[in-house]
Structures are given as C-alpha cells and as structure tokens.
Amino acid sequence: MRVVPVLVALLIALLSALPGAAVAAGPEPKVVLIVGPAGEATQRYRERAEAAAQVAERYTSNVVRVYSPEATWPAVQQALDGAAVVVYMGHGNGWPSRYRDSLFGGTQNGFGLNPVAGGDDASHQYFGEERIAAEVNLAENAVVLLHHLCYASGNTEPGLPEGTVEDARQRIDNYAAGFIEAGAGAVVAEGHLGPAWYVQQLLDGDRSIDGSWRRSPNARGNETTFASQRSPGFIAAMDPDRADGGFYRSIVYRDGVGAGQLTATPIAPVATEPAEPTLVGSGLNIEMPYFQVRPLAGSAMDLWIPYTVEEAAALKGLTVGVRWDPIDVDGPATEGDGGAPEEAAVPPSEPAPSASAPSEAPAADPSSGRFTFIEPEQVGSVVQPAAAAIGPTRIKTKLAVPERPGRYRLVTTLHDPSGVAFDAPTQALVPAMFVRISGELEARYLVASSASAPSGEDFRLPLAVGNVGSTAWGQVGDAGPRNLDKRPIAGSIVAHWVRLDAETGDLPGDVHHRLPAGFLPGATERTPLGLTAPDLPGTYLLLIDVVVPGIGSLTARGADPALVRVTVE
C-alpha cells in the first residue's frame, strides 16, 4: 500500500479546511492572454480573451492577462516567461506582403502592441519574430494561439488580394518561426474562431493540438500539409475556405504536442511592474518640433526637434517614432475599403464553454466574399521607430509623409536604442503637432477673414497667394509664335461674389488677377485686389480661387478657397 502519499493528501485537505489556513499552490500550466490595440475591434477582442481566461481559470490558477492599453513589450515579455499556453489577438504583420520586398524580422511575424502604457486602443508598434526568438522564454511544448490576425493563417488584410497558395504557405511558416524558436511546440492561427474553445481543449484531457485543430468548429475539410521550411522537424497544415483562397486556418506543430504535454510553471509570488525605460531625471526639455520645408503628400522629409538636456549621455542611441492621426484628409480612411458583398457568409458561431460567446460585429471582406473578424490596418496607426541624428541642440529624424493630403495630428514618440518606448512621463515632454499636408494642387491665401465697403464703391483688398502644392500653375513657355505647345500659360486669381442676406440686386462680375506664367511650387504673389462693392447694403461672401488653363479651378480639384465675409454699408 502507498500509505505515505495518501496520508499527505489527507493532511493537505484537513489543513485547507481550517479557518485561515493556506497551502502554497503547486506548479500549474501558465496561460497568458494578450490583447493588442486594434482600433474598434479591441473591445471585442478583450471580451473574447476574457471568455477564454474564464475557461482557463477552471483548470489552472496561473492565468495572466495583458490587455490594451497596458499591453506594452516589457509587460508582454515579462508575462510570457514560462507560458504553456499563449493567446494573442490584435494586429498582425507578416510576409510576403505588399509593404516590403523581403522579410523583416524586427517587425514582422509577431505582436502589435501599445507603444506606451495607458495610451489608446489604436496606435500600435510591431515587435517581430527576432525579438520573440531572442527575448521570450516559453515553457517547453508551449502552444501559441493566434486569433483574428492578418497574415498569420496565410491571409492578408480585408479588402486586399490574398495572393497564391504558395504565398499563404510562406506566411504560415514565417509567422510561426519566432514562437517556435522561443520554445513553442505548436502555433495555431484561426482568423474567425475565438480562443475559448482551444483553451478548453488544451487544459481538459490529453488531446493532441493537431487533433483539436482538425476538430475545430470552423474546420472546412480542405486540409493540406507541408514540411516547415523555417522550423525543421515541424509540420505545417492549412485548411482554407476553398482550394485557392480564404486562408483563415493554419497550424505549425511537432508531433505529440498537446494537452498531455503542457509544462507546469510555478506561480510568481509577487507580480512586479515591468521595467520601462525613462528619460525623467535627465533634465530633458523639448520644444515644438518643426519642418524646414513644407510637407508634401508622399514625400520624405526631415523632422527637427529642438531640445536641451543636462545628461547628454541619456540620449545615446535614441530612436524616434512618428504617427500620423488623420483629422480632415482627402479620400477614404483605409485602403481597400468596400461595401459588404451581396452574398456574404457569416462564420459559424463560436462555442463558449464557460459562458455565452461575446457579441460580435464582423466587418465585410469583399476579397473573400464573407464577413471577417479580422481588423485591417488603419492609416497612421503604426509607430515604427527610426534612428535619429542627435545634434547639440536639435534631434533630426527622417519620416515619410502620408500619401493623402489634408490635416493630421503628428505624434512623436521617443524610444530607446532597441525600439522600446520610454515611459509615459517621458512622452509627455514631446509636444504634438497639427500639420497640413499639401497635395499636387494646393493654394494658400493670406487675406483678412472679414472686410467692409460702401455700397457701389471701389475698394482694395490686400491679398497674398502661395503655390504650396507640388505642381507648377501653367508653364513659363516661349512667346514665339511657332511652337504652340511651349507657349506661356498663366493662371489667375479669381474673386467671386455670393449673396448671404440680400435677395435682389445685381452682383459685380468676377475679378481676375493674372499670375506669372509657370507659377512654381513655393512661389508667392502679393497683390491688392481691386474690387467694386455690390449696390445694395447687406452681407456678402467673397470667394477667392485660382484658375489655371488646362487644370481649371483649384477649389474644384479639392484645394481650399479663401473666404472673406464682406459687409456692404
């Protein structure tokens, strides 16, 4: 008889029943749930993560949650130490993709996380496979569950072409590689099914993870397998909606990994706050950043950040990130936007072992002909630090100006040499900027917003107009009669009257002021406009525009006109 183990078990039970008694918990599988910032989808992801966390807590007390806006790299890296099951939901960034010509392990095939704790659910910074492989230590045979990501299961982004089956295979293999190097025995990617079902499969019984994947409620029956090229000895499998597309289910695994092989990890006695780098205490003071030239859509330019600091060594290796928040811009907010397809299939409802599944509001993906729970990348939300030149009084960094003209809020963040953002008090030292980005055809006017004039009398309105676009207005040309294609072409400033409260009476005709031929970008014309006020007293609007032969009205092409409210007495 095994008397001693039985007596020990009885003793533990008796001690546990005593008032105030506490028995230290033994090692249990560690389950880590990560929700990165993903815009409007973030709250849905938090709900799905919480449903999975409640399932996990039925089997283990070693459950760690890291949710946006607190999901920074230091917090995630600390939480992942010894994790047996990892759940991640958020933005995904993989390869092949249209953004790069080759794989970049610094940002691809990993997590999209909050740059700074306590921020918002939109801005995110990618930490790729290189950081995961080098800085994360998972438990042996850990299982990583990637849900609702772009690229991880072979897909791209909603609204974008998926590419070939070979593209999908590469994405699946690439996305798993960093996690496998960090100790994972399997990486599952499900585009539409939430994680609760998989968490229960892993913690209840001794099922293999590949067997659970094949029994998934979202299984399509189109499975194909191939040997992993990035992770030798591992098998990769995909189960698309159809043979050549709809790549929303994949797994990369080693035989025998599953519920019976999860490694137990001792529970950390005290949860310590992750260490964040800081420049507080260095005497750093930052003034308003600026550009030395006007920002043009689609261009590359330098951002200058004036500063003073007491401890100059604190800035060694500093990197700078920028984020463009659209305020009033031309064109759609995201590329690939589209309406719902006429025949969109809703994914199968997800079982929730511990509670009813959270409500969902899937978006339409026209490229796949179905609704999707995957959040596409949003314009301006990605923070990607770049090297900076540190001068004695100025920090200079190069940045790419967005392709779409309009007004933006430019948020600048400071990062350490490895790309990790400094803490929130450090970021508060950097002023935000409001930037107007000019397009191909843009005009700016310096003129009073209001004026007054006697009825029927002539008056003069001081005005300056500048070409702040990237294209000349007309051409300098040649006054000779032989070559009409090279003749001078000049635009004009046009002032047009509009009634606001007067119902009758004739309006003065449009006033035209000829600009120099071939009015170049950066040029400015200063002139007083000679005008005649309307005969009837009242309030009028004077609309000032630039018209160029062959181009037409700049206002009609999207440029803002000048508006002057004129009171006629």
Image (cartoon, rainbow, N blue to C red):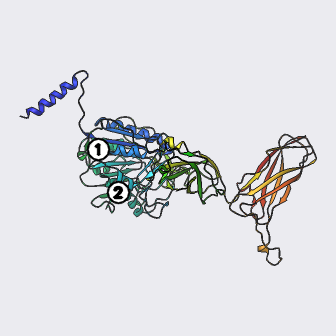
Name the residue at 8% across, 35% down: 2
Name the residue at 10% across, 32% down: 4
Q: Quadrant of the C terminus?
A: top right
Q: Nearer the viewer, residue 235 or 545?
A: 545
The residue that disc 1 covers is 202
Q: Which mark is residue 557?
A: none
**Residue 353 on image: x %, y %:** 34, 37
Can you name the residue that lies furthest to the top here? 19
Q: CA distance from mark 2 to mark 1?
A: 21 Å
Left or right: 96, with 180 as reference point: right
* Amino acid at the residue labelled 2: Ala
Q: Nearer the viewer, residue 72 or 559?
A: 72
* Amino acid at the residue labelled 1: Leu
Few, some or many residues within 10 Å of mark 2 (<14, 14–19, 20+)? many
Mark sitting earlier along the chain (2/1): 2
Q: Picture quarter containing residue 470? A: bottom right
**Residue 106 on image: x %, y %:** 42, 56
Name the residue at 43% across, 53% down: 418
Residue 400 visible (yes or no): yes
**Depth-wise, is mark 2 or mark 1 nearer the camera?**
2
**Residue 487 on image: x %, y %:** 79, 72
Q: Picture quarter containing residue 32? A: top left
Q: Quadrant of the N terminus?
A: top left
The residue that disc 2 covers is 177
**Residue 432 on image: x %, y %:** 59, 45
Q: Is residue 140 above or below residue 21?
A: below
Can you name the residue that lies furthest to the bottom here? 482
- Give the SS element for disc 1: helix
- Give the SS element for disc 2: helix
